[in-house]
Image (cartoon, grey):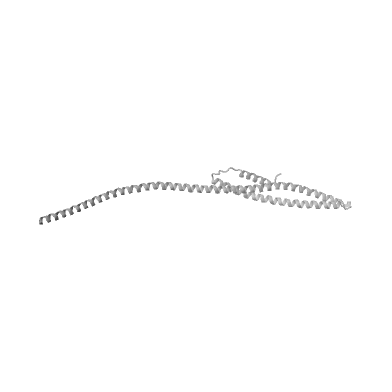
Amino acid sequence: MATVGEKVRTIVLGNLHELLDKTIDLNSTGAIKQHIRDLETARDKITDEAAIAKGRLLTLQSEIRDLEVQISTTNENIELFINDGDPSNDHLAETLEARLIGFERKLAEKKDALAVETTTSTALEEASGRLRAKHAEMVETLRKLESIERTTKAKETAAAALRQASKTGEVSVDNVTQRLRERETVANARFERALGDMADKVDADVVAEQARKRIAARRAKAQG
């Protein structure tokens, strides 16, 4: 019959296998974080159970060695009583033989328990190793996903900023272009008008100079 401890370990190992085989949505960092927390909880429990199993294993090994020593010593004492040539103390050999039978039964029980505890301890150690490996794997998966998320978010932010800048740039360039064209048109009109005014002034000066020369020629002719 399984002891309470063995039943607990069986349940723990059963839950562990279910946890290790659980399908996780690798596209959800939230699900992975929860799974990591579950793995850490299970790891702590398995570590405790493995320590208990290891302690029980060492205790059984020590008890078996003690029983083997007792059995050996009892056998030697029985042989001494039987072979001492004194039939009057043979009843002591019988008492020791009865005690020997008890030791042998205990030894058999301890060895059976040792076999079970060895199997349990080995299973817990293997489970602990699988848990640590799975935990490391999921932590690495989470690290990669978070890195991808950060990179993706940065790219999305940059793309949005570039789109906004592109729209703003188009509006700004169009506005500036329109304003510059308007200024250019006004400047051209003003320039042409200034050129016209200057041409008129130059022409008036030329005419005035010609008029002075002609007046001077008239005076010279009149005096001559």
**How many numbered badges does the structure rendering display?**
0
Kindly identify the residue that appears in the image at 37 percent across and 48 percent down. Answer: 173
Point out the residue furthest to the bottom here.
223
Kindly identify the residue that appears in the image at 69 percent across and 51 percent down. Answer: 54
Point out the residue furthest to the front here.
224
Kindly identify the residue that appears in the image at 79 percent across and 52 percent down. Answer: 70
Residue 139 is situated, as x and y percent measured from the top left of the image, at 57, 49
**The N terminus is located in which quarter?**
top right
Residue 37 is situated, as x and y percent measured from the top left of the image, at 58, 48
Q: Is residue 5 something one can see in this rendering?
A: no
Residue 12 is situated, as x and y percent measured from the top left of the image, at 64, 46
Taking depth in this image into account, of 219 and 154 the one nearest to the observer is: 219
Residue 41 is situated, as x and y percent measured from the top left of the image, at 60, 49
Looking at the image, residue 186 sits to the left or right of residue 25; the answer is left
Looking at the image, residue 12 sits to the left or right of residue 86; the answer is left
Q: Is residue 72 something one can see in this rendering?
A: yes
**The C terminus is located in which quarter?**
bottom left
Taking depth in this image into account, of 93 and 30 the one nearest to the observer is: 30
